Image (tube, rainbow, N blue to C red):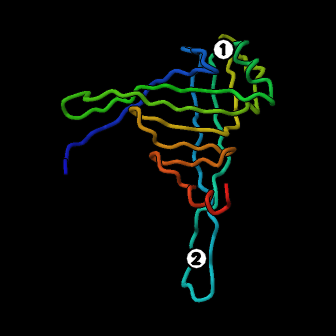
Amino acid sequence: MSNKIEINKLTNANIYMNGNNLLGRAEEVDLPQIKHKMAEHKALGMVGSAEFFAGIDKLECKIKWNALYPNVLKACASPFSSVMIQVRASLETYNGTGRTEEVPAVAFLTGTFKEFPMGNIKPQDNAEYETQMSVTYAKLVVNRQDIFEIDVLQNIYKVGGIDMLANFKRNIGA
């Protein structure tokens, strides 16, 4: 076992919407937070209670744009059309000798925007536009390895390529 300290840094990214490069247009992105719904179990004879997996909470993404981009807002305006978002970053690893590795980290999202702004305008300051998206599909790939994949409409939940719902789907005949 190695005792060397390795530090991963992810400090910048680029966003693509439906395959279109939006380099320099987004100021910030909040990727979905995966929250497991847990069901409490308590019964006679148990000294305490326990919680067990019962599903996944809704997934949401926020993107803060640094200006008004009509093509972005047009994509955000329809509550009936899904949008594919790709957030591409470079994950750097450092140790005592400096940077030792630099690998791609890519988040893939599909969802529908549920909020789109008219803007927040202040004197002598850039206008701010923040969009919020309801996500139905999320996948994270680091160094070409799948970390997780969730598709709530297709009952897909994979971690490291392993189907977490395989038995469940087989049991319900899916």
- According to the image, label 1 marks what residue? 67
Q: Would you place residue 157 above or below residue 117 in this image?
A: below
Return the residue nearer the eye: 172 or 53: 172
Residue 44, by quadrant, is: bottom right
Mark 2 Cα shell of 10 Å, populated few (<14), some (14-19), many (≥20): few
Return the residue nearer the eye: 134 or 68: 134
The kind of secondary structure element at disc 1 is loop
Mark 1 residue type: Ala
Residue 49 is marked as 2
**Residue 141 percent across, percent down from the top left:** 46, 35
Residue 9, by quadrant, is: top left
Decide which of tag 2 and tag 1 comes sooner along the chain: 2
Point 48% across, 30% down: residue: 106
Point 25% across, 29% down: residue: 100
Residue 123 is marked as none
Point 52% across, 21% down: residue: 14
Q: Nearer the viewer, mark 2 or mark 1?
A: 2
Return the residue nearer the eye: 10 or 110: 110
Q: Is residue 60 left or right of residue 50?
A: right
**Residue 99 percent across, percent down from the top left:** 26, 27
Real-space Cα separation, disc 2 to disc 1, in angstroms: 50 Å
Residue 169, by quadrant, is: bottom right
**Residue 119 percent across, percent down from the top left:** 74, 20
